[in-house]
Image (spheres, rainbow, N blue to C red):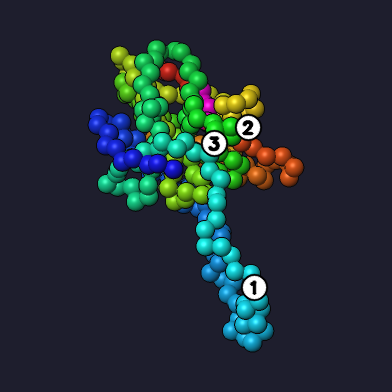
Amino acid sequence: MYIRRVYLSGGGFAAGQTALNKIKRGGSTMNQDNQKTKNTHKPRNTKSAQRKKATETILPTVEEAKLSLPPHLELLPSDTDETPTLIDREHYGTTLKVKHGHVYTLRLGVHCYSGGLATFRDDCAASCFIPATPGTEQYIIGLFFVPEIYPAKFMDVIHLKADKPFRLRYIWGSAVLENNNNAFGFTIGNDSITTEKDGILIYEKDIRSQIHDCHRVFFDVLRIQVEICPVK
């Protein structure tokens, strides 16, 4: 994977930093259970354990890991975020001028690259923050956590603007994980959505427990719908 460091201008990242911090807290839980297991299961220092260790197969130093993220990601610099954030510069920060009273369908994630496979699997976590504060500009942030690159994360941002101040109203039931290559969709339940004072947080991290063992979920984007409400 080729990663190039870029610097972005304007207030898009600054406006969304608070929301990003809300979402990334959830991603930090992905490996906690694995870390606890590693720290609490240590082999006893006995002759039996030593003989077993001596006969164990030595794993290779280098292993191949299949990863379908786009090969041209860029690193988004930040003075406040301690973990790397990867973006697709071609689509990151897409700006859309909106009209009051209209409903818009928005897609956050990887929009064009497939490589024959979907970008994210059902062991990945997807999240989105929809601000509720009024303004003439709104930034909707999506974050995706992939085990192979954790604690790094992939981020996408959509910038909405209008001539007059507006609020965003999330259309409940509209959050769906979609695949760019087919019409499949995995609906995110309302139990994965939290209403906060300054916005709505969507965070789905447990897809595997919601599907049958013989099924798999592959997706590229998180689709949501929002209504543009005028500020009275």
Position of 19 compared to 64: left or right? left
Name the residue that disc number 3 marks: 119
The three-letter code of the residue at mark 3 reads Thr
* Residue at x 46%, y 13% (from the top left corner): 102
* Magenta range: 221-225
- Earlier residue among tags 1 and 2: 1
Identify residue type, mark 1: Glu
For label 2, count other residues whose C-alpha is less than 10 Å away and answer few (under 14), some (14-19) or many (20+). some
Could you tell me the amino acid type at mark 2? Answer: Phe
Label 1: which residue?
56
Which of the 4 image quadrants contains residue 167?
top left
Q: Give the image location of residue 64, x and y in percent.
A: 55, 51
Identify the residue shown where x is 59% and y is 69%: 58
Q: Nearer the viewer, residue 42 or 12?
A: 42
Q: Is residue 132 left or right of residue 8?
A: right
Residue, x 59% and y 84% (percent of image)? 45
Q: Which residue is mark 2?
A: 186
Disc 3, SS = loop
